[in-house]
Amino acid sequence: MDEVRIDKWLWCVRIYKTRNQAIEAIKAGKVKMQGSSLKPSRIVKPGDIINLSIGPLNRTVKVKELLHNRIPAKLVAEYLEDLTPVEEYERIQLMKEFNAERRDRGLGRPTKKDRRYIDKLKSGFKDGLL
């Protein structure tokens, strides 16, 4: 296993579901190495640290080993080391908790007044007012 392209490696370790999604993310500048954007044809080596932006999550992974074929999810830990800080995962969990409106079962859809209140509440969290 001499050389592996970064788009193929990201697909093999199940960071992206398809290789095309990995290519699109790399072209969009969501995948960086040493602070610079990459091309999908960039060759990865063991020890490389890759920064990924997947939605609101900013992940950092280290390449442990190279591989050419997609592997089962249980074996992913053998090929990459997750260097993402725990605070990043906690931030995402907190965002999920505050963004989801909770309605009791059987209440139906929110009324116009309820909707305005929900929108006001959400904009307050986004603006840092609450």
Image (cartoon, rainbow, N blue to C red):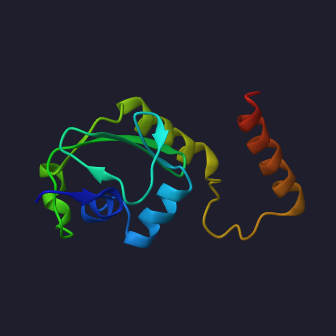
Q: Quadrant of residue 87?
A: top left
Left or right of 124, for residue 77: left
Q: Is residue 91 above or below residue 1?
A: above
**Residue at the top extreme?**
129
Tell me the residue at 54%/50% (across/down): 29
**Residue at (54%, 46%) from the top-left corner?**
56
User: Residue 106's spot in the image, x, y percent?
Assistant: 65, 70
Q: Which one is nearer the viewer's eye here, 79 or 110?
A: 79
Q: Residue 126: x and y, percent?
A: 72, 37
Closer to us: 73 or 42: 42
Left or right for 16, reference 36: left
- Image quadrant containing the C terminus: top right
Residue 93 visible in the snapshot: no
Residue occupying the point 16% across, 50% down: 77
Residue at x 36% of width, y 61% of height: 7
Tally of numbered discs: 0
Q: Position of residue 48 (x, y in %)?
A: 26, 40
